[in-house]
Image (spheres, rainbow, N blue to C red):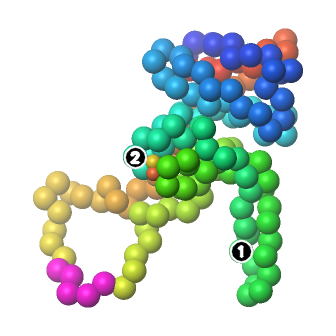
Amino acid sequence: MAKHIVGTVAEIGPGQRRIVEVNGVSVGVFNVRGTYYALRNSCPHQGAPLCLGSVKGTTLPSAPGEYLWAREGEILRCPWHGWEFDILTGRSLFNPHRVRVKAYEVTVEPPEDGGGDEEEDPAVQTYPVTVEAGRVVLHL
Ligand code: FES
């Protein structure tokens, strides 16, 4: 894993991001309240430039009628279809592959290749980022 300087701490301040290309891989480096995170700039849904999406928070589980907003600045929303990812982990906030609606007249047949792909959690590839002498360093 090689080191790649993506900028200085001053250039990528809290709440900011920088998208870089390293060895043919587009990566978004995000500063979330002083900690840096790097995500592959490709949505696991249909390959959108995920790191160009909006950064926001999310609602937390709450009682009926309550509205609890939290995690501001930690959630990345894909610009194409709105899938949301945790910048801190790359994990999908909500796994749409596990959502089902009531279905009628459905037959179930064993998968030919073992199947199961639709059960996996979509996630974005993440990379380590460190700060060395005031420089933000991506390890890729
Ligand atoms: S390509 Fe990202 S949500 Fe569809």
Residue 136 shown left or right of residue 102 in the figure: right
Q: Which residues are magenta?
A: 103-107
Residue where numbered disc 2 is placed: 46
Return the mark for residue 61. Answer: 1
Q: Give the CA distance from mark 1 to mark 2.
A: 28 Å
Residue appearing at x 79%, y 53% in the figure: 72
One can see residue 7 in this view = yes
Q: Main secondary structure of the magenta part?
A: loop
Three-letter amino acid code of the residue under disc 1: Pro
The part of the image, by quadrant, that contains residue 132 is top right
SS under mark 2: loop
| Numbered-mark total | 2
Question: Residue 122, how many percent across, how many down?
Answer: 46, 52
Image quarter in which the N terminus is found: top right
User: In the figure, 76 relative to 39: above or below?
Assistant: below
Q: Are the two marked residues, 1 and 2, in contact with CB atoms closer than 8 angstroms?
A: no
Question: Residue 11, how many percent across, how many down?
Answer: 81, 21
